[in-house]
Image: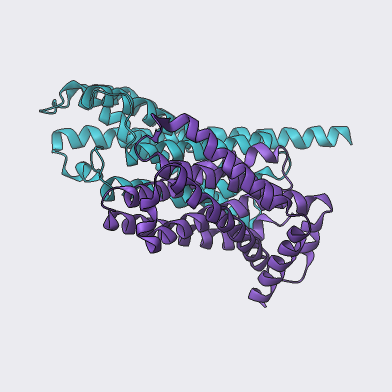
Amino acid sequence: MFFRTAWLVLRKDVAIEAKSWEVVTTTLFFAVSCVLIFAFALVKDGRAVGDAAAGILWIAISFSGTLALGRTFERERYAETLRALLLAPAPRAALYTGKLMGMLALLGLAELLLVPLVALLFQASAMFSRPLLLAGLLAGGTVGFCAVGTLFAAMLVRARSRDVLLPILLYPIIIPVIIAGVRGTAALLSAPPDEPTAIMWIGVLTAFDIVFVTLALWTFEPLMTE
Amino acid sequence: MRKAFGPIAVLAGVMLVGAPIMVARAPYESTMGLVQKIFYFHVPSWFAMFTAIGVCGGASLVHLFRNNPRADRIAEAAGEVAVLFGLMGLVTGPLWGRKAWGVWWQWDAKLTIALLLEMTFISGILVRKYGGPGSDKLAAAVGIFGLAVTPFVYEAVNIWRTIHPLTSVVPTLPASMGAPFWFCVAAFMLLMVLLLMVRVNLGKRQAALDELYLAYED
């Protein structure tokens, strides 16, 4: 029942998205614009300064993620469909899980574009020398970001000035996740790749993911009750 | 709690007057000298902040699951008190760092996460102020997540390579420094409780006033 509901929510979101591709295209475009802005800020003599590539990658992921979070829930607000979802006789946590999986798929797609782009533009192909560790860092960071982001975006649907409040509430809490992602990726970029450090940061990310997903599943139900 | 207010206020007043005298009498630390004495106020303000965060997180959980307005007022008050003591820590810390490290700020694990914690609880105040109806639940979520991140801050300094003094310094203090230190901790805790009570009471009055307005308009 739980996973079936989550799967149905995910399938519904994908079906709606597949009609217009609105969120996917705007998110991907915005992610690339982020990379460009930071490229101008952090490139000196044609090369990125220090570990800038790792930072740029994670900034682009979190900024475009915030944009996508806002958009996906805006869609649920237009026709009060979120209320309909909440009225459905299904576990609330399953609705959250479905929404979370949708966000993970979307950000995963953005990362598929962003990682090669950053590696190409900033001579950071050393990231790919340990593909498993890179995948671990990306997965851990994305799950942590989306777990908190989906919860906050859902609960802000009914709030006033929700566009401003989402980043204000989200960033202070997920910055530890971003720090872990950036430091871990930077460890992979050093020559030779610093595997123990990257593995340590994957551990930190996993700890955050466990805490955040548990809390989000636990508090989603009372938070969405009017 | 109302009855305890007077005695707590007097006791906190006396202790906060006595604290500077005790700090002044404490011996100088051998390497850092005078600047080290800021530690008697810096560490207690973080202790007070962590306690306020604990109160805020606990009250937020009660409010979220039981829908209890009183717990909400406590969470609101504790969130604001936490921001206040965090601000004291963030002001006293750089004053010490300027002398000890030569810079006002270091992007060190503990400093960074302490700043994040402060921002988290400021965001809780912002969402209450601008979130419109229902924002108490949102602030409760912020309080709970803020509480969940706090242990990482406390452990950060011990796990990650950091230039901030370790938390293990505190139990190894010699008695001549330990006594004024724990005295200051007690004084700050009392101050925290006092501020919390004043703020909760203010919230209660506010709620009563809002109800009167509504009754008058009807």
The chain in cyan: B
Say which quadrant the C terminus of chain A sits in. Answer: bottom right
Dividing the picture into quarters, in which one does residue B181 lie? top left
Q: Is residue B151 visible?
A: no
Dividing the picture into quarters, in which one does residue A217 lie? bottom right
The chain in purple: A
> Which residue ends up furthest to the right in the rendered image?
B218
Using residue A60 as the reference point, say whether residue A29 is left or right of it. Answer: right
| Residue shown at 32% from the left, 37% from the top | B108
The structure's colour scheme is by chain
Dividing the picture into quarters, in which one does residue B184 lie? top left
Say which quadrant the N terminus of chain A sits in. Answer: bottom right
B91, above or below B150, in the image: above
Whole-percent x and y of residue A58? 48, 46
B37, above or below B76, in the image: above
Whole-percent x and y of residue A18? 74, 60
| Residue shown at 67% from the left, 53% from the top | A24
| Residue shown at 58% from the left, 36% from the top | B125
Whole-percent x and y of residue B129? 65, 34
The number of numbered discs placed on residues in the rendered structure image is 0
Using residue B105 as the reference point, say whether residue B130 is left or right of it. Answer: right
Q: Is residue B21 visible?
A: yes
